[in-house]
Image (cartoon, helix red, strand yellow):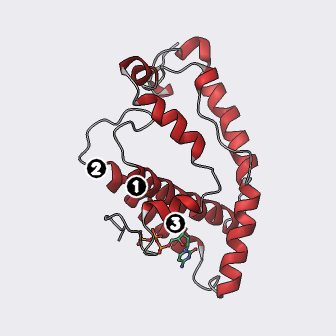
Amino acid sequence: MMATSGKDACGLNGDERSVSLNGSSDKSHSLVNGATTGASAHSKLQNGGGTAAERFTFSPEPTIEDIRRMQAEFTDERDWNQFHQPRNLLLAMVGEVGEVSELFQWRGEVAEGLPDWTESEREQLAQELSDVMIYLVELAEKCKVDLPQAVLRKMALNRLKYPANKVHGSAKKYTEYKD
Ligand SMILES: Nc1ccn([C@H]2C[C@H](O)[C@@H](COP(=O)(O)OP(=O)(O)OP(=O)(O)O)O2)c(=O)n1
């Protein structure tokens, strides 16, 4: 089960955890803090409201291949590959998706930037999303899916299925378009 108090499963509190993040959370803090400074800043961060210049971006590293390699090292060091077959990894990933859901449940709609969330809640979310990503990457590895290239192929398909000039501003599924 997910830790729900200020301490996580390793016994770290929010402050201790943020020390180990190498500044990667600073960027999100500044964006998020912007959202709490006033109504206009807040509304700008609603879904779809930000310009490209304001958009939150990730650090370039680690790459997906870096994550695959680091997780492979982690499991090798523990002799855990015996447990990490595809189905087990899938179930572990779905369990972690459940933990992400738990953080959102009963809150109603949540605005982009999570303006009402505490630092501890944000850090919990970062950890649970990371768990999902780690298991997803390892699942892809164990299924021999080259995930970065597969994502490129899928995005190309998505662009074909949803031509921008046809679907602009509409959330309809492609099967609903009749032309
Ligand atoms: N057999 C395992 C167990 C853990 N992990 C790694 C991958 C995940 O990133 C993380 C998952 O650890 P936990 O199962 O302890 O789950 P949580 O970190 O979510 O802890 P909790 O369930 O207490 O929130 O550790 C792994 O690779 N293989």
Three-letter residue code for mark 2 = Gln
Between the C-alphas of marks 3 and 1, the distance is 27 Å
Between the C-alphas of marks 1 and 2, the distance is 16 Å
User: What residue occupies the far left of the structure in this picture?
Assistant: 106
In the displayed structure, would residue 113 be above or below residue 13?
above
Query: Would you call the spot at circle 2 few (<14 residues within 10 Å), some (14-19), or many (20 or more)?
Result: few
Q: Quadrant of residue 19?
A: bottom right
The reply to whether the residue tagged 1 has its Cβ within 8 angstroms of ligand 1 is: no
Mark 1 and 2 residues: CB-CB less than 8 Å, in contact?
Answer: no
Secondary element type, mark 3: helix
Determine the residue positioned at 30% across, 35% down: 109
Given residues 36 and 112, the one toward you in this image is: 36
Between marks 3 and 2 in the image, the one whose residue lies nearer the viewer = 2
Three-letter residue code for mark 1 = Ser
In the displayed structure, would residue 135 be above or below residue 166?
below
In the displayed structure, would residue 134 be above or below residue 168?
below
Q: Quadrant of residue 153?
A: top right
Between marks 1 and 2 in the image, the one whose residue lies nearer the viewer = 1
Determine the residue positioned at 66% across, 40% down: 154
For residue 27, the mark is none
Q: Position of residue 45 (x, y in %)?
A: 46, 26
Secondary element type, mark 1: helix
Q: Position of residue 46 (x, y in %)?
A: 42, 25
Q: Position of residue 14 (x, y in %)?
A: 44, 60
Task: Give the mark nearer the N terminus: 3 vs 2.
Answer: 3
For residue 90, the mark is 3
Task: Give the mark nearer the N terminus: 3 vs 1.
Answer: 3
Which residue is label 1 attached to?
A: 120
